[in-house]
Amino acid sequence: MDLAQVSETDTEERLDDFMSKARAASGLLKALSHETRLLILCLLSNGERTVSEIEQFLGLQQAVVSQQLARLRMENILQTRRDGRQIYYRIADPQLNELISVLYKMYCEPGSKMASLESDSRDD
């Protein structure tokens, strides 16, 4: 095998790996692209919560919250733990929690620049 073939094979393997990771990132971004799911994740970026706490904070019906939590669990974005009758939800991956925290700071944190820009554009 000559050096050109080794290099070409190595490049193809790296491209396959890159494409696989891009597919995974795309799937994650699709899961995050729903407003309610993003709100839930922003809330959970500050620590685990029960379904009741999420419902109360967001002012949504239990069925809506449960449906979105189920989708996030199906995508392995959330993990749960049971304490008696309560089920607590948390973000499964610390790196994802960091990403959600950045989005929270950019868009949701009081006084954030992006949140101010969004509210200004709605006022027009």
Image (tube, rainbow, N blue to C red):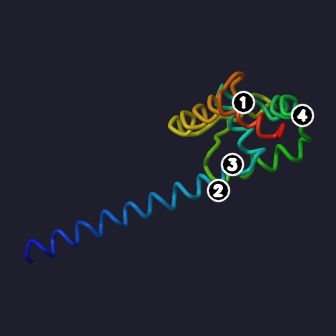
Residue where numbered disc 3 is placed: 72
Marks 2/4: CA–CA distance = 24 Å
Can you tell which quarter of the image residue 3 is in? bottom left
First reached walking from the N terminus: tag 3 or tag 1: 3
Question: Of discs 2 and 3, which sits in the foreground?
Answer: 2
Can you tell which quarter of the image residue 30 is in? bottom right
Residue where numbered disc 1 is placed: 116
Residue 49 x/y as whole percent: 74, 29
Residue 100 x/y as whole percent: 61, 36
Residue 73 x/y as whole percent: 68, 48
Residue pictured at 57% horizontal, 35% vertical: 97
Residue pictured at 15% horizontal, 71% vertical: 6
Residue where numbered disc 4 is placed: 59
In this view, the residue in front, 7 or 61, is 7
Residue where numbered disc 2 is placed: 30
Marks 4/3: CA–CA distance = 19 Å
Question: Of discs 2 and 1, which sits in the foreground?
Answer: 1
Can you tell which quarter of the image residue 120 is in? top right
Instruction: Name the disc covering residue 50, or none.
Output: none
Q: Amino acid at mark 1?
A: Ser
First reached walking from the N terminus: tag 2 or tag 3: 2
Question: Of discs 4 and 1, which sits in the foreground?
Answer: 1
- For mark 4, does the 10 Å Cα neighbourhood hold few (<14), some (14 to 19), or many (20 or more) residues? few
Mark 1 element type: helix
